[in-house]
Amino acid sequence: MTTAASGLSEDDFAKDNYGETLFPRKIESALVHLRDIGEQHVNSSVKVRAWIQNARVQGKKMAFVELREEGSWSIQGLVIAGSEVSRQMVKWVGSLKPESFVSVEGTIKRPIEPVKNCRVANYELHPTKVFCEAPAPETLSLTLASANKAVTQVDEEDTVVDGVESLNVSGSAVPGASLSTHMNNPVMRKRAPVSQAISDVRMTIRKIFTEYLDARGFNLFEPPCLIGAASEGGSEVFKLPYFGKEAYLAQSAQFYKQMEIAGGRKKVYSVGPTFRAENSNTRRHMTEFFVMDLETEIEDHYHEVMYLLEDLLLHIFRQLEVRCKDQIELVRSVYPSPPFLLPKVGEEVRISFADGQKLLREEGPEEFRNVRADEDMSTPQEKALGAIIREKYKTDFYIIDKFPESARPFYAMLDPENPAVTNAFDFFMRGQEILSGGQRIHLPGVLESRIRAKDIDPESPGIKEYLDIFRSAGVPPHGGGGIGLDRVVAWYLALPTVHLASYYPRTPKRLLP
Amino acid sequence: MTTAASGLSEDDFAKDNYGETLFPRKIESALVHLRDIGEQHVNSSVKVRAWIQNARVQGKKMAFVELREEGSWSIQGLVIAGSEVSRQMVKWVGSLKPESFVSVEGTIKRPIEPVKNCRVANYELHPTKVFCEAPAPETLSLTLASANKAVTQVDEEDTVVDGVESLNVSGSAVPGASLSTHMNNPVMRKRAPVSQAISDVRMTIRKIFTEYLDARGFNLFEPPCLIGAASEGGSEVFKLPYFGKEAYLAQSAQFYKQMEIAGGRKKVYSVGPTFRAENSNTRRHMTEFFVMDLETEIEDHYHEVMYLLEDLLLHIFRQLEVRCKDQIELVRSVYPSPPFLLPKVGEEVRISFADGQKLLREEGPEEFRNVRADEDMSTPQEKALGAIIREKYKTDFYIIDKFPESARPFYAMLDPENPAVTNAFDFFMRGQEILSGGQRIHLPGVLESRIRAKDIDPESPGIKEYLDIFRSAGVPPHGGGGIGLDRVVAWYLALPTVHLASYYPRTPKRLLP
């Protein structure tokens, strides 16, 4: 199934050793991954499958190729005409387009001096067979070098500038590209080592979250996306026709994680998409976003839940520094940021909402001199408070506890000692909220009176079914929280927008790819 | 915050030791889980938090309570009037409604003879404090005993019979309930040990799937639910208004897992919901269902993927027998089924589609005497073939390979040696398909000609973006498969309907709870 390569002629003694092929040509040598190449391979023949990162001829007898396998792992190849390699083959390899996929057989050699441009610096490959399994186009819409630079137009959808920007080059010869261009070229966007590093960090966070809870007896469960009633307000919910009725897309797993507790599962968690039909075109919003949710029975006090969530997040951050050290460094080389400050053990910062507002009044900017304990915090207030706390306590991670009653939904348990506030908290990273949680009301009578106090009809769709959970059998005291995965990734790495933290970001203006 | 219990009077010396309470009353003894109770606890005071499974007075000086904690773990409690327990307290405990949630302090004792009705048979609890943290209603809509029986009306939505059926009692004193009743009473449905056992099996399958792939260097990723174009046919896709445009709910992760391979992630997997707007009210269909998806580069031959998937599923089944032994037994006690037969190592069954049709012709029922190798198999044919294979090869798990071209979508790679068939396979459990997979076309030219051959416009929405993946850079040969999690659970346990395998099943007629 090998098709003729251009310039290939009958009198080419190496004609079976290169060319384009639909089905992989058999190569006898064993496959090695670039990250594993070592002294044991020197002067041995190996098989490598990789992308052409660069290829050029150097005279008629030699071609240079840079081969990239995964992430930023690359190796230099020298194709030298001789007894196995013909001049036609040299010319053909040197003309391969960047981002073509090839399988190569060759010998590992020590270079005269360490290779500068490749991550495998102490070895090079001398190919004897090169098969192109998938050629790249003549011109790439986004080069790897540009894809691996910081995005230049973050607020993409408001000022759509497609194409590579040649003006903003951040002191380097390679131009950056707008967020639109990155998103419109998903294949090249994803091949950039910086994208893969962000993906690794994200998936490592998910993995640590799961490991931590599995080790503590939590049960994974699956809340539905399609629901029959919009229990958390109708305006920001996606609605769709559903066999003559209407369905909605879930805005949170709240109802369902409480159902699991009511159903006797004791401690539960879920990780999945939730949806919000909010026409917000900001760096903090997406219409489909990922939440890591948990809910657990409370034995004596809701701070059991708060401390569990705090310990969980601190564990994630500390593990991340170890498990994703390389990836974090790589991201910082593209998106420079100050290190994410963690509190020392025993010096975790948990302040009440009232004390937070007091800090803002006393130490915040002029405009916040009159903030009150019984009104909710705005995003600018939160950021100002984050700056004060970083300065004062040297941490980018902290808890605000005891939110006022008016700032929380009907299901928040009121503080028995001060019903003006709730047993509910938010967690912050770099002055931005990443978790909302607290104790929920578990008795139907109390819940119904809170629903009425918030001017909601207890018989309305969604609310009635919610109340029925607690009416149908005795439900133990419980609480939990939901962690915004996209935001944790973005704020930990100090990315310029949450969209860069997502695999396929969805915004009011973007549904593709 | 303790409220007065009925019958409580001022002269009750034990009045602080029982009653209803909104916030948990402090109990000094350490919490124990019923599954952990052992000799070390005898004659010690412990704390237990559990549901009342049953309570009754036995004369004026004693009450029996059965306390259930998680799954089927229960213990017998004897509340005996004496120096710590008053007669009023005995009466109050004996009147607690089943499925109320209580915290109890008491002493662990050895019973005179093993307790018959409780899983903790060798110990009993003598409570000295009983606080009801959440009372159950006077009457339960579905009792635990009924919830723990087999459903009696599986095809629920066509013949909705709500309420407990008193006629169909399967030889026992406790009546069964219809699937509708189970689904309409989610809290009690979930409390039934059989439901929790099914959930455990499901989550263990997910966990083993993840462990297996993590150990082999696969990267988890997240395909979106909201998409901008319906690439896999328009009729069975959910459509919704999206900020002046239209959005669709993803019918599969196919497009996105191939995008990840194109994006250089080498080996990827995802676990998540997908959606199909099919008005099928059967025991095999849901509108929202969970798929465990994977995709990987192919080195030499697509059977690399097929064998990986086979090994993965065999690993899941073998591990399940070990990790979920108790749960599988419990489910079988409610839904009797023959054991799930696995092939011996080295005797795995992989037959070609053509040979499968031949088996049906030669050994199947009369009506399949004329089936042909170039036409797709129907569900009855698949079941008949499953029966033949079970009889002949003693396995409930097998592979049908090399599906005819006409039975596969445009992206299936044709067999280079026989383009009438594809490099694509299905996996079966008990004669029912649970996995579809194979090699995908990775070259844009080949793909475009296959799209045209299937009479699809290569420029149509969704298709164009799909083609662009392969046009934008060289994509390595790759393949994968999608495993229907709901079906794997249901068919492994031989449940009467896939709806029982799901946390919150969605059908054309059910969106609640």
Image (cartoon, coloured by chain):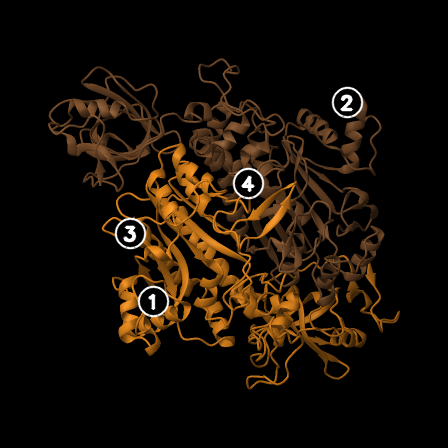
Chain colours: A orange, B brown
Q: Which labelled disc corresponds to residue A303?
A: 3
Residue type, label 3: His
Q: Residues within 10 Å of mark 4 (few under 14, many from 20)?
A: some
Which of the pair B331/A233 is nearer the observer? A233
Q: Which chain's residue wears label 2?
A: B
User: Depth check: A136 or B224 in front?
Assistant: B224
Report which quarter residue A367 is drawn in.
bottom left
Residue beneath label 1, please? A342
Crowdedness of circle 1 by 10 Å Cα count: few (<14), some, many (20+)? many
Q: Are marks 3 and 4 on the same chain?
A: no
Please tell me whether mark 2 or mark 4 is closer to you in this view.
2
Instruction: Identify the chain of the residue marked 1, using the numbered disc in the image.
Output: A
Marks 2 and 3, how far apart at CA: 65 Å
Across and down, in percent, residue B188 comes to 43, 31
Tell me if label 4 and label 1 are in contact, CB under 8 Å: no
Disc 3, SS:
helix
Residue at x 77% of width, y 29% of height = B359
* Amino acid at circle 1: Leu
Say the numbered circle drawn on residue B365.
Answer: 2
Query: Horizontal and vertical percent for residue A75?
Result: 61, 72
Q: CA distance from mark 2 to mark 4?
A: 33 Å
Structural distance between the alpha carbons of marks 4 and 1: 41 Å
Find numbered disc 1 in the image and state the secondary structure of the residue it sits on: loop
Q: Amino acid at mark 4?
A: His
